[in-house]
Amino acid sequence: MIDRVIEVQNLVKRFGTFTAVDNISFTVGKGEIFAFLGPNGAGKSTTIKILTTLLRPDSGTLRIDGIDLADNPNEVRKRFGIVFQDPSLDGELTADENMDIHGVFYHVPKKLRVERTAELLKVFGLWEKRKEVVKFFSGGMKRRLEIARAFLHTPKVLFLDEPTLGLDPQTRNQLWTLVKQINESENVTVFLTTHYMDEADKVAQRIAIIDHGKIAAQGTSQELREQTGKTSLEEAYLAFTGSSIRDEGGNTSADQLRQMAKLWGGNRR
């Protein structure tokens, strides 16, 4: 039986009379790369905010690494890393300094911070740039640094919210190669969202599609294609969700980062 690192059972979240997440359930296994897909306004962002303790559910049970989010959110926060869509690096600091601040924030001992920073910057091809100010980095370099930083405190789960948005195909491909390398070497569970169906098809071992607050389908890319009789994941996705254009909704990633800093800042030792 696969160890379950993320467990979501009968999750419900309402905003007034609107039900954003409507009694959904799913699990994610240890070391799995899991894609959570859905149109704008489908309930995807709300679910991620609940999993990362930014929102409280109205009902349902959620566990990360066996810990109930409602009972012990502080312990849950120690067990995951997150990379939002919007940039979150301090552009006036060097790559080394950005990594070090993150390590201090998570109470990583200094010796381990130094060792882990060196290891990750080498993996992500940034070791030679470690003393350079981040504001002069390219978009791809900044994104690599953000993902390297998210791995610094050795999380059990890494949440990646559209991490390759706006990047060219070569950079996107390189990023996923590096993420898969760490996923395999450290057995880190990766929970990703993306609107690039080719990415989900290539990297995710399983996929859940959410629409109108409900899970429309779950399975491997092949299983979803077989269920719909389609030849590509994108065609299967459209078969489950329709082709109408959806409005963007929810807070910006910057808002989420401010919420996260406020939550965690109040719990620092």
Image (cartoon, helix red, strand yellow):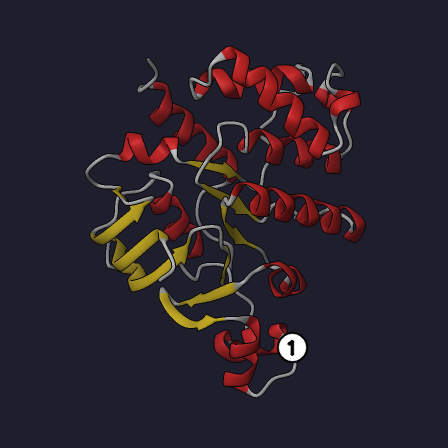
Which residue is more in the foreground, 210 or 118? Answer: 118
Outermost residue, bottom side: 229
Determine which residue is flagged by label 1: 232
Mark 1 lies on a secondary structure that is: loop
Q: Position of residue 241 (x, y in %)?
A: 49, 74
Is 137 situated above or below 39? above
Residue name at image x 38 percent, y 41 percent: 52
Q: Position of residue 92 (x, y in %)?
A: 67, 15
Residue name at image x 43 percent, y 51 percent: 30
| Residue 188 visible | yes
Amino acid marked by disc 1: Ser
**Left or right of 165 in this view: 186:** left
Residue name at image x 54 percent, y 63 percent: 205
| Residue 243 visible | no
Where does the N terminus fall, quadrant-wise? bottom left
Which residue is more in the foreground, 186 or 104? Answer: 186
Q: Position of residue 85 (x, y in %)?
A: 57, 42
